[in-house]
Image (cartoon, rainbow, N blue to C red):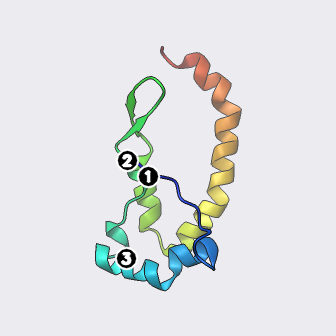
Amino acid sequence: MHQNHDYGRHPEGKQGVYYGEEAERHRQLAGGWRHLRTIADTTEVLTPRKLKRNALRHWSTAKRYASKRAASLLNDLWHPVWFALLALTRPLRRSVRPR
């Protein structure tokens, strides 16, 4: 299970949480960037009906291995595009999805 968090506890918000002194120490303790995982890395996702395989988890790994700056830029540009595409294709995906 994963609990969603906000960034209000840190005076610098998300920037401070991701790139501050405490975050750097956590990365060192984990063994570096390549050892960190997020909710996007889960092998399975709980849907209202069942557990299903997380087919996009390897995409998360590929993004993580890019440089920190490139990954940040990719997220800022890619996420709005991705979610717009999901919204546009949702009716088609629902109509062809096996029940």
Residue 72: mark: none
Q: Position of residue 54 (x, y in %)?
A: 40, 40
Q: Which residue is drawn at 52% across and 73% down?
A: 18
Looking at the rendered structure, the secondary structure element under dot 3 is: helix
Q: Where is residue 55 in the image (x, y as percent from the top left)?
A: 41, 40
Distance from Cα at disc 3 to Cα at disc 2: 19 Å
Hey, what amino acid is under mark 2? Thr
Residue 42: mark: 2
Q: Say if mark 1 contacts mark 2, CB within 8 Å.
A: yes
Q: Which residue is drawn at 38% across and 60% down?
A: 37
Q: Mark 1 sits on what residue?
A: 39
Distance from Cα at disc 1 to Cα at disc 3: 17 Å
Q: Residue at x 39, y 46 (%)?
A: 1
Name the N-terminal-most of marks 3 and 2. 3
Q: Say if mark 3 contacts mark 2, CB within 8 Å.
A: no
In-image side of 39 versus 71 (left or right)? left
Hey, what amino acid is under mark 1? Ile
Q: Which residue lies furthest to the bottom in this view?
A: 21
Neighbour tally class for label 2: few under 14, some 14-19, many 20 plus, Cα within 10 Å: some
Task: Please identify the quarter of the rendering in which residue 90 is found.
Answer: top right
Name the N-terminal-most of marks 1 and 3. 3
Q: Where is residue 45 in the image (x, y as percent from the top left)?
A: 42, 38
Task: Please identify the quarter of the rendering in which residue 91 is found.
Answer: top right
| In the rendered image, the vertical position of residue 55 relative to residue 15, given as above or below | above
Q: Mark 3 sits on what residue?
A: 27
